[in-house]
Image (cartoon, rainbow, N blue to C red):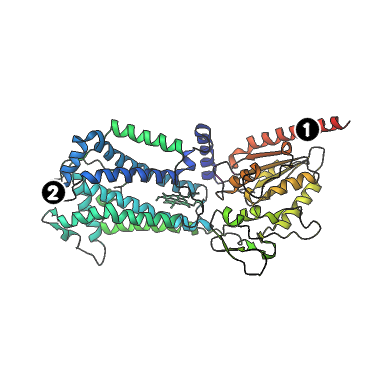
Amino acid sequence: MNIINPLKYAYLAMEAWFNLAFGSEWNPLYNMGRLAFFFFWIVFISGLYLFIFFDTSLTGAYASVEYITHEQWYIAGIMRSLHRYASDAAVVTIILHMFREFALGRYRGFRWFSWVTGVPALWLVITLGITGYWLVWDELAIYVAMLSSQLIDALPLISGSMSRNFVGEQLSDRFFSLMAFLHFSGQPLFLIFALWLHVKRLSLVKVTAPRGLAIGSFIGLLVLSIISPAVSHGPADASQVTAALELDWFYLNVYPLLGYFTAGQTWLITLGTTLFLMALPWLPAKKTGPAAVVHLEQCNGCEQCAEDCPYDAITVQARTDGAKFEHEVTVNADMCAACGICVGSCPASNPFRQKNEQLVTGIDMPQMPINEIRNTLDKTIADLKGNNKIIVLGCDNSLDYSQFETDSIKVVGLFCIGMMPATLVEYALANGVDGVFVTGCRTGDCYFRYGNIWMDKRFAGTRQPVLRRRAKRSRIKVSRAAITDGTRFQKELIAFQSHIEKLNGDEELAHE
Ligand code: HEM
């Protein structure tokens, strides 16, 4: 039984609206991480262009940015605006990406690593923006420089050393060059490393945004750059206080805190928030089920499970048991998300095998082995009554399907719909079921990333092990649902049963 969490429910309802507007492939809410990568590309390319004209000296920086903005407004000016707005868009998408993982509860258990590495990655993006604003060397830059030195000087060990970089009230040229070095190479390199770490435990990560979203958001940024170009404040002058600064709240949000708190308290707030965010996966902790187990005597080393695993938990190695096959697979228990997708990938999970004995497959889930799934299916089929018997094979993470059970409709739940061997559908049809309704998480939003994609491909015959041609496709329906889709799902189920009733009637007539 799903316990409906109001935040998750509201979020899924909103995603459904976005699906209507954009379709699942282009739904921006499904693609926030990928969009952030896209914005990084814009930032990178526009940054390269700006670098050609930027003067990295303290005395020349402001004038060079003015040249970029006003004299070469038609290219460099637009590049500057794209650089700024794409940076802002990156922060927005990262925060929405983070919020989504939180709202849907996808930050705990086996996902802890992606969550914990995501937080410093966000901080790196923000500090990269801070050094960027510093380099303009305008009134805003001096505000950033002065307040940053207050913050750094409050740290034990380096106490006072940052302020020493200010000669009189001006920043030293050497220190300014250090900022330029950080912004152009040091911080981007750290960020690339942090992002590599962030997705390290995932396989088949998509870092390119869907074409429509990329084109649409690029046009949006371009239009914004033309109608509201990014400009500088007046030149930096430490002896004057600027009355009105236009802060970029996505990047410079920490500085206003210094108006209310001391530098030490500001550190406590920021570090406390960071540590709290990083500790979230354990507040409370979520247990991941036991890892998949390889049964070598049934494994022919085909490697399909290793290719399908969404969490890179399966590796292929040379055979160790002297069998005639070249390879075998092994599971890294620490990386395993216990999704069971490997069971659906294994050709030995075919329920028509080992008929009157225990079904043993090449790779299995100890808490719900394929033999138990076959037994449950057999018992559930035996419980069905009436003439139009339907089995729902559904994913436990999408919707609580048991609420739709009737005498003639029964449910067999799986960890993920990708866990289902395609032959299980054939098996149900061959054993007295009139129709099989297969359902998993919404398209584009599989809880285990790839389960419903692999299932679609197996059914389409493009990924092994396939749903065989002889399977009666007119008696199979594929659907998708989340906890907010109950009403729609029920209608589809009833319509499917009517369809099966009609098929049965037609077949009976044909026999007479
Ligand atoms: C800094 C920029 C970030 C980028 C570019 C980024 C990008 C990505 C990408 C591309 C994925 C893989 C999605 C997939 O293929 O299923 C991902 C996964 C993930 N990200 Fe981020 N991310 C960033 C920051 C964050 C932050 C700040 C958090 C949260 C603190 C976070 C939490 C996660 C989690 C939990 C996953 C795992 C999703 C899963 O296992 O299904 N990310 N991220």
The reply to whether the magenta stretch includes residue 365 is no
Up-down: is 232 above or below 223? below
Give how far across and how far down residue 265 sits, in percent: 29, 57
Q: Classify mark 1: helix, strand or loop.
A: helix
Q: Which residues are magenta?
A: 441-446
Coordinates of residue 28 in the picture (x, y in percent):
46, 39
Let me know if residue 415 appears in the view.
Answer: yes
Quarter of the rendering occupied by the C terminus: top right
Label 1 vs 2, first from the N-terminus = 2
Q: Is residue 215 left or right of residue 344?
A: left
Considering the whole magenta stretch, tell me its main secondary structure. loop
Residue situated in front as seen by the camera: 18 or 450: 450
On residue 23, the disc is none
Mark 1 vs mark 2, CA separation in Å = 82 Å
Residue type beneath disc 2: Thr
Task: Give the farthest residue toward the right.
Answer: 512
Left or right: 365 as drawn, with respect to 73: right
Please tell me in which quadrant of the rendered image residue 261 appears: bottom left
Give the residue displayed 69% in from the left and 43% down from the top: 403
Name the residue type under label 1: Leu
Q: Which residue is mark 1?
A: 503
Q: Is residue 372 above or below residue 245?
A: below
Specify few, some or many for label 2: CA neighbours under 10 Å numbering under 14, 14-19, or 20 or more.
Answer: few
Q: What label does residue 59 carry, if any?
A: 2
Say left or right for 319 vs 21: right
Q: Position of residue 119 (x, y in %)?
A: 40, 54
Residue that appears at 52% across and 35% down: 23
